[in-house]
Image (cartoon, rainbow, N blue to C red):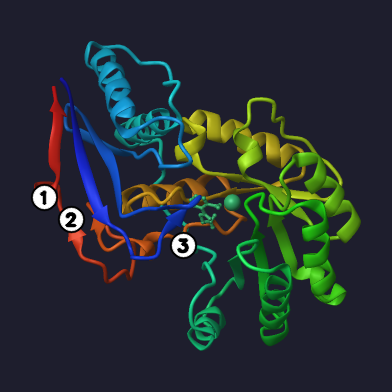
Amino acid sequence: MRGATLYRYSVPMDAGVVLRDQRLQRREGLLVRLCEDERVGWGEIAPLPAFSRETLDEAQQAAQRRLRDWLAGGEPPDDALPSVAFGLSCALAELTQRLPETADYRKAPLCSGDPDELFARLQALDDKVAKVKVGLYEAVRDGMIVNLLLEALPDLRLRLDANRSWTRPKADSFARYVNPALRPRIDFLEEPCKTRAESLAFAQHSGIAIAWDESVREADFRVRAEPGVRAIVIKPTLIGSLTRCRQLIEQAHQAGLEAVISSSIESSLGLSQLARIAHWLTPHAVPGLDTLDLMRAQVLRRWPDSALPLQTVEQLETVWRS
Ligand SMILES: O=C(O)CCC(=O)c1ccccc1C(=O)O
Ligand SMILES: [Mg+2]
């Protein structure tokens, strides 16, 4: 006997969370619960506003169609909507015990806020890798912060993320401010420039390695080794099924690139599944999962050591059941 339920969660966000110029007041998404005989599997379907092409309503419609096929005995093909394909494939993988339980709860802290508190937090890390968003302010300020962090903590490595905000001259001026001796400790800079060609030329010119994030989701993107490119970032909610994510990870590893599993601001349920996927498929790369503290609550499953209150299944709205 098979059964399926869709729940909707809605979690208030921290006041300052802005995604591509729009403020995110609440994070909303669906949780899917599949059962078959005695077994249960959960997944999260949560299109990210300003990033996903599908809306939550479209995702719900598509999920219901797929679930009807599954309830009728089929093994539905992956959905065309990435968030739906990801959430359903996680739920099926839990149900069939193909998603290992062990998780990699390291999370490459996002550096912001009070510097003293930040230093204490970074000093306490085992694997000292942290992430800094750049390109929001002046390039000179970004460069100074990078120098400051790397000088203060000699075993720290940084991931930087410019989200395609720089022209090539802006990116060059950033690079000029970063002490050349410190540049090798920048593991990578995600998407420095507006175009891939500019980013590649920047990497080759500056000696700062780059990573693809937005590019990975473009139709004409192919994973390949290129001078100056070190990694690809995989945000499964924006990419698609577990099978598709595995394929990209394998292609990256074959090309000698690092593959980094990263958050699309899922709830604690989705984040903890990403931590399991990271431990399973990218065991050598610290995942980019430091987004739980942008939220004011956890959902269904706890992230270790988080003090945020938990919304239990009884508190979720049931939107569909069959
Ligand atoms: O990658 C991480 O470390 C955290 C996640 C993150 O930065 C992010 C989360 C949601 C949407 C976009 C981004 C981004 O990479 O800019
Ligand atoms: Mg990024």
**Residue topped by disc 2:** 311
Up-down: is 36 above or below 191? above
**Is residue 269 shown left or right of residue 285?**
left
Residue flagged by tag 3: what amino acid is it? Asp
Up-down: is 230 above or below 140? above
Q: Residues within 10 Å of mark 1 (few under 14, many from 20)?
A: few
Q: Residue at x 36, y 34 (%)?
A: 87
Examine the image and state in which quarter residue 255 appears: top right
Q: CA distance from mark 2 to mark 3?
A: 20 Å
At numbered mark 2, what does the secondary structure look like: helix, strand or loop?
Answer: strand
Up-down: is 248 above or below 79? below
Tell me which numbered mark, 1 or 3, is placed earlier along the sequence.
3
Among all residues in the image, which is located at the extreme left? 314
Q: CA distance from mark 1 to mark 2?
A: 6 Å
**Is residue 264 shown left or right of residue 41?**
right
**Residue topped by disc 1:** 315
Residue flagged by tag 1: what amino acid is it? Gln
